[in-house]
């Protein structure tokens, strides 16, 4: 019997919850409302947590310290970052002491050095270029990376997130910097380490011996697709980057098992999407009409059911005040 057919809450069907961080538990360094309470409830029930992030600008210990500071006690061993995974990959592929030019934050440099490689500043010395996000990455840094890669250096990106969440809305992420360098070079990186590659999720589950992990994320193109590639169920929360419009248009590999407004969805009945709702969607000659009443997220699930079956997205109108309010909240009005 699947999780969707059982009557108790969603998280009760899993033995590990793997959280993304930015947009799920916090924005920059501010806890998302309800996140600390949800994590405390998991601890009370004895359900372990892990934290997997594409953010390469912090060491695992720093991430654990930040989580603890905002009310989510965490240990360093529970955190897997793309910076750490990249360093492990470098240690596997290249001999100790290999010269690496690093674009990104100090945390990424520290991880590369801890893996036994040599961080260099001169493009001409580099045998490998590692590109990660850092708020102080300059055009000069991109230029040095281009010189090194054209000179034969391998090119490894920690992740390809186009944006990162912030209190001001999505801002350019490492993927934007990777795209700039790719445009200049006319090619893509040799390897992209972070999500949607499943390695971070698989490592988290393997470390804890989990047989039924659940991935919780805010991005379809990294968290949800990464869970799909890892063969894991996923919960999309609407507190970060991906929105209703993106979800309706999502291809199969980016469709989450579950959708919730926030982490409170972990403790709601375990209904997978698509599913019947208290909402109805009627085809009106090239557009859809939403009608009914109930939870706003259920209106979204009803629309997903229709859009995914049709393989297309159409304009949506609301019949009645409740439907109109739901569409406005979903930014589909």
Image (cartoon, grey):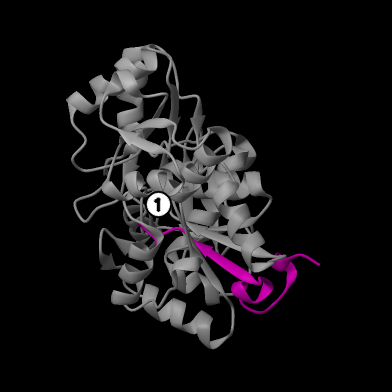
Figure check: 28 above or below 47: above
In the rendering, at what x and y percent does residue 255 appear? 57, 46
- Camera-side residue of 5 and 18: 18
User: Total marks drawn?
Assistant: 1
Figure check: 294 above or below 247: below
Mark yes or no: residue 242 visible. no
- Residue interval drawn in magenta: 1-25
- Which residue does the image show at 26% across and 42% down from the upper left? 134
What residue is pinned by disc 1?
Answer: 318
Q: Residues within 10 Å of mark 1 (few under 14, many from 20)?
A: many
- Camera-side residue of 47 and 91: 91
Q: Quadrant of the N terminus?
A: bottom right
Figure check: 72 above or below 92: below
* 228 left or right, relative to 321: right
Give the structural element (helix, strand or loop) at label 1: strand
Which residue in the rendered view is the most extreme toward the right?
A: 1
- Which residue does the image show at 50% across and 24% down from the upper left? 190
């Amino acid at each position: 019997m699947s999780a969707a057919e059982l009557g108790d809450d969603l998280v009760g069907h899993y033995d590990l919850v793997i959280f993304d961080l930015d947009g799920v538990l916090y924005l920059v360094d501010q806890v998302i409302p309800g996140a600390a309470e949800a994590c405390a409830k998991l601890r009370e029930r004895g359900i372990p947590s892990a934290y997997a992030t594409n953010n390469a600008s912090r060491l695992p210990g720093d991430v654990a310290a930040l989580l603890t500071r905002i009310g989510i006690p965490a240990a360093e061993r529970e955190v897997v970052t793309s910076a750490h995974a990249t360093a492990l990959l470098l240690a596997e592929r290249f001999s100790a002491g290999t010269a690496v030019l690093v674009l990104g934050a100090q945390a990424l440099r520290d991880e590369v050095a801890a893996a036994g490689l040599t961080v260099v500043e001169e493009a001409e010395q580099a045998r490998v270029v590692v590109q990660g996000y850092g708020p102080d990455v300059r055009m000069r840094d991109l230029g040095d990376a281009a010189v090194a890669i054209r000179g034969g250096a391998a090119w490894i990106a920690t992740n390809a997130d186009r944006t990162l969440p912030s209190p001001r809305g999505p801002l350019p992420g490492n993927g934007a910097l990777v795209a700039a360098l790719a445009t200049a070079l006319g090619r893509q990186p040799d390897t992209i380490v972070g999500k949607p590659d499943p390695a971070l999720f698989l490592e988290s589950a393997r470390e804890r011996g989990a047989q039924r992990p659940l991935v919780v994320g805010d991005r379809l193109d990294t968290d949800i697709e990464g869970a799909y590639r890892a063969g894991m169920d996923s919960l999309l929360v609407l507190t970060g980057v991906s929105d209703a419009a993106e979800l309706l248009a999502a291809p199969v590999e980016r469709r989450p098992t579950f959708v919730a407004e926030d982490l409170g969805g972990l403790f709601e009945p375990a209904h997978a999407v698509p599913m019947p709702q208290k909402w109805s969607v009627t085809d009106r000659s090239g557009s859809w009409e939403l009608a009914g009443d109930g939870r706003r997220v259920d209106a979204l699930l009803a629309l997903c059911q229709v859009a995914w079956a049709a393989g297309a997205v159409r304009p949506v109108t609301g019949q009645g005040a409740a439907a109109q309010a739901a569409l406005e909240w979903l930014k589909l009005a």
